[in-house]
Image (cartoon, rainbow, N blue to C red):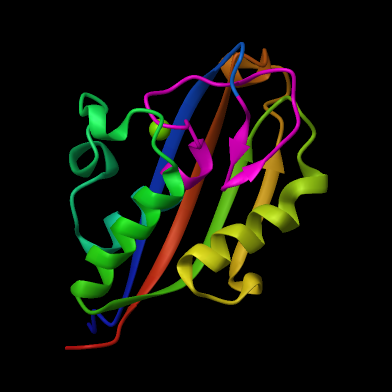
Amino acid sequence: MSNRFRVGIGYDIHRFTEGRRLILGGVDVPHSRGLAGHSDADVVLHAVTDAALGAAGLPDIGELFPDTDPAYKDADSRRLLTDALERIQAKGFAPGNVDLIIHAEAPRLSPYKRAIAESIATLMGVAPDTISVKAKTNEGLGPVGSAEAIACTAVALLEQTEL
Ligand code: MG
């Protein structure tokens, strides 16, 4: 079987906290609370970055950018994705498509899905229609359902461009 196409999966969850901006996929989403984390807590970019790293067979986001490292305190997660993409491209892979689900009870994300897709597409250097953003509630169940947290699941496809 050819290894020309490689798929990876990423998942992340961050809890809500007071006094922080809510940043999803590099987009500022107006909300009463933001997400807690060592970096900017962009749960969407973390899941996408892990999916892409996984597809390339690279170490995961926690290994590459440890949350114990002061260098990543309040880090812009766009920088983490860009750094990961450089490592991915150095292995001869180019990004294909990304499909992702944001699990959030609040805020309502449908007005921001397009902006999030465009933001990720710009970061990855791909066409916006190759980034699919879905938003789902958790039907009131669990930490996502009680609006204690936002989670994200992402799948990324890479194509080997150099063999
Ligand atoms: Mg994270």
Above or below, 39 against 52 in this view is above
Which image quarter holds the C terminus?
bottom left
- Quadrant containing ligand 1 reads top left
Front position in the image: 33 or 97: 33
Q: Which residue is drawn at 55% across and 59% down?
A: 120
Residue 92's x, y, as percent?
Answer: 22, 79
Determine whether, in the image, residue 113 is placed left or right of residue 80.
Answer: right
Residue 8's x, y, as percent?
Answer: 35, 58
Which image quarter holds the N terminus?
bottom left
Residue 82's x, y, as percent?
Answer: 37, 59
Q: Residue at x 25, y 34 (%)?
A: 71
Above or below, 162 against 130 in this view is below
- Over which residues does the magenta segment extend? 21-47
Determine whether, in the image, residue 136 is placed left or right of residue 23.
Answer: right
Front position in the image: 87 or 148: 87
Q: Which residue is drawn at 40% across and 31% down?
A: 39
The part of the image, by quadrant, that contains residue 35 is top right
Q: Residue at x 62, y 27 (%)?
A: 21
All told, the count of numbered labels is 0
Determine whether, in the image, residue 22 is placed left or right of residue 79.
Answer: right
Above or below, 132 against 27 in this view is below
The part of the image, by quadrant, that contains residue 3 is bottom left
Q: Is residue 54 within the magenta segment?
A: no
Q: Look at the image and tell me whether residue 79 can be seen.
A: yes
Q: Is residue 40 within the magenta segment?
A: yes
